[in-house]
Amino acid sequence: MNILVTGGAGYIGSHAVSLLIERGYNVVVVDNLSTGHIEAVNEKAKFYQGDIGDYEFMTRVLKTEDIGGVIHFAAFSLVGESMTNPFKYYENNVGKTNVLLKAMTDSGVKNIVFSSTAATYGEPENVPILETDKTFPTNVYGETKLSMEKMIKWYRGAFGLNFVCLRYFNVAGAHQTENIGEAHNPETHLIPIILQVASGRREFISVFGNDYDTKDGTCIRDYIHVIDLGDAHIRALEYLVSDGESTVFNLGSGEGFTVIEMIDAARRVTGHPIPMKVEERRTGDPAKLVASSEKARTILKWVPKYEDINIMIADAWNWEQNKRY
Ligand code: UDP
């Protein structure tokens, strides 16, 4: 089956593309390269530079390439930026997904796996978070992803589009044999920044708040290896193709680590001291985010292989030292 991956030049998308190719799929990538890297796209994938918001272009790709399913990653994903520039996020994430869905349904493409986020939940009511918990995003990014989920559900009603929405939080690690990994500009995520300190590219890591109600006062997050995440997307697609019911799954380890635990782990893995400075809390950061992924484990038979944060950090560290984009 031919699979279209939107945003296949991004961090998570490029890993999903490589995994799909390893499993024998024909992969087509559409990416406008606004934040992605052409070097990240597996050379066995067919690459189209273009915009998912361009209806004519998308219809042409979907028809010419005889696409059987879409994995949709293309989106802006910086929480801070979304708060100061909501227009950019609604226009790009919501507006262009609407065009993608129209192009898909007009071209008879029935299956979509959507890269959503646990930011759709907002401040959690319960930890670990369940798929049935209320969704009340606390930032524009999460709000746009929730709108995209809802839009996909309405397209299901109107056109019979089958969907799986995957909600996940903190993605880490890198491919272990191909030289691809995380490369955001500007970088805002914890692990890459910690590793930039280890490699001497930054002086220290700022810890945003140590007065939260957690064991060491710093925020707790649920980390998932990018390869396990790619595997979940492929399983979700295979589930849809074999007539699985359209639904939402959380993806996570079910276990949380504090910011200081992550810094300590990185010190052990890299052998570097990694100085830190405690600073003010960052706006919008909940104290503890941990997702229950029992549903994905049961229905998709998803068994993450790299749940150990030391492996995630070691793979990210290998990438940090060998980065080529
Ligand atoms: N964090 C931090 N210093 C940084 C970047 C992040 O202390 O330079 C903290 C952040 O406040 C949060 C956690 O690390 O509690 C994970 O943040 P990240 O931006 O990686 O992911 P998020 O949880 O926001 O999706």
Image: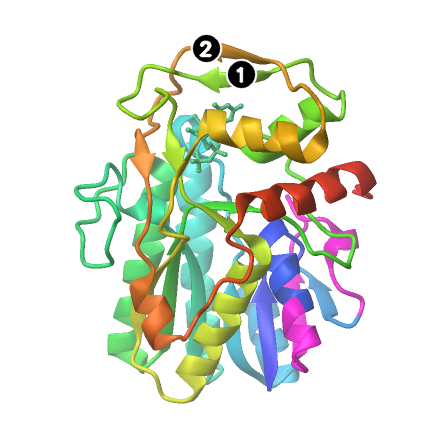
Q: Is mark 2 within 8 Å of ligand 1?
A: yes
Instruction: Please state which of residues 306 and 228 is positioned toward the viewer in this rendering.
Output: 306
Q: Determine the CA span between mark 1 and mark 2.
A: 6 Å
Q: Which residue is mark 1?
A: 206
Q: Which residue carries the number 2 mark? A: 279
Residue 66: x %, y % from top left: 60, 86
Find residue 123 and report its image quarter. Answer: top left
**Circle number at residue 147:** none
The image shows residue 211, relative to residue 54, as above or below, that is above
**Residue 158 relative to residue 133: left or right:** right
Image height check: is 199 above or below 94?
Answer: above
Amino acid carrying label 1: it is Ser
In-front residue for pair 2/128 = 128
Residue shown at the point (39%, 23%) measured from the top left: 218
Q: Position of residue 50 (x, y in %)?
A: 65, 59
Q: Residue at x 76, y 26 (%)?
A: 199
| Residue 222 is a magenta residue | no
Question: In the rendered structure, are the residues bearing label 1 and label 2 in contact, judged by CB atoms less than 8 Å apart?
Answer: yes
Does the Cβ of the disc 1 residue fall within 8 Å of ligand 1? yes
Label 1, residues with CA under 10 Å away: few <14, some 14-19, many ≥20: some
Q: Residues within 10 Å of mark 2 (few under 14, many from 20)?
A: few
- Percent from the top left, x then y, of residue 317? 71, 39
Magenta-highlighted residues? 19-43
Question: Vertical placement of 132 versus 316: above or below?
Answer: below
Q: Residue at x 43, y 78 (%)?
A: 111
Q: Earlier in the sequence, mark 1 or mark 2?
A: 1
Image vertical order of residue 56 relative to residue 142, above or below: below
Indicate the position of residue 39 as horizontal and vertical percent values: 79, 53
Amino acid at dot 2: Glu
On the rendered image, what quadrant is the C terminus found in?
A: top right
